[in-house]
Amino acid sequence: MPIDLSFFEKAARAVEHGKIRSYTSLSGSSKALFFSMVKGPCLLLCSAEAAAGELYSDAVFWSKALGSDEPVLIPPEGDPLRLANLRHLYSGKIAFIASVEAALSPIWPGDKFPLLKVMNRSAADRDSVISTLESYGYLQVPLVSGPGEMSIRGGILD
């Protein structure tokens, strides 16, 4: 038996056309379903980081089921994935989920977004690269095991 999504479709179109600016009466996974149906720029704010993570997981499920683009989760300041996910603000992605704390954390203007370009077969000053990465929030660790980490062993930067 097919699921009737006409209520969600009408509500999503109303948001897209600016007839309503917010929608607050949904609960459970229906929030993520509705969010996944909105076509156009959309930011879903959650009261806490745990709620944002849960809603993000549900929205990824619904976006895959509906064939729409997956949303981007914006982590709070200090999270190693924050910089990687913030770049999507400048790359055309349109669906974002964040906690209030993460949304209020400072970001860079588009023309000042920190990029480090490394080109194949070109020389770069190792200490300058390390200093730049540290200013972007990378942590020095003995062995890299995740995003936002770097390891320096002799002349090798990992």
Image (cartoon, rainbow, N blue to C red):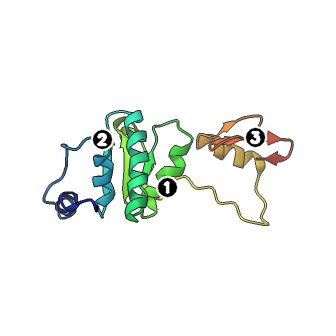
Q: What secondary structure is found at the residue carrying circle 2?
A: loop
- Which of labels 2 and 1 is toward the front? 2
Few, some or many residues within 10 Å of mark 1 (<14, 14–19, 20+): some
What residue type is disc 3 on? Answer: Ser
Q: Name the residue under label 1.
A: 87
Per the image, label 1 sits on a secondary structure element best described as: helix
Label located before the other in sequence (3 or 2): 2
Q: Give the x, y percent position of residue 114.
A: 55, 52
Report the amino acid beneath label 1. Arg
Q: Which residue in the structure is indicated by mark 2?
A: 28
Residue occupying image coordinates x 41% and y 40%: 54
Give the image location of residue 132, x and y in percent: 64, 46
Residue 4 at x, y percent in the picture = 22, 60
Q: Residue at horizontal 51%, vertical 44%?
A: 82
Who's the residue at 14% across and 55% down the image?
Answer: 20
Badge 3 is on which residue? 151
Which of disc 3 and disc 1 is earlier in sequence? 1
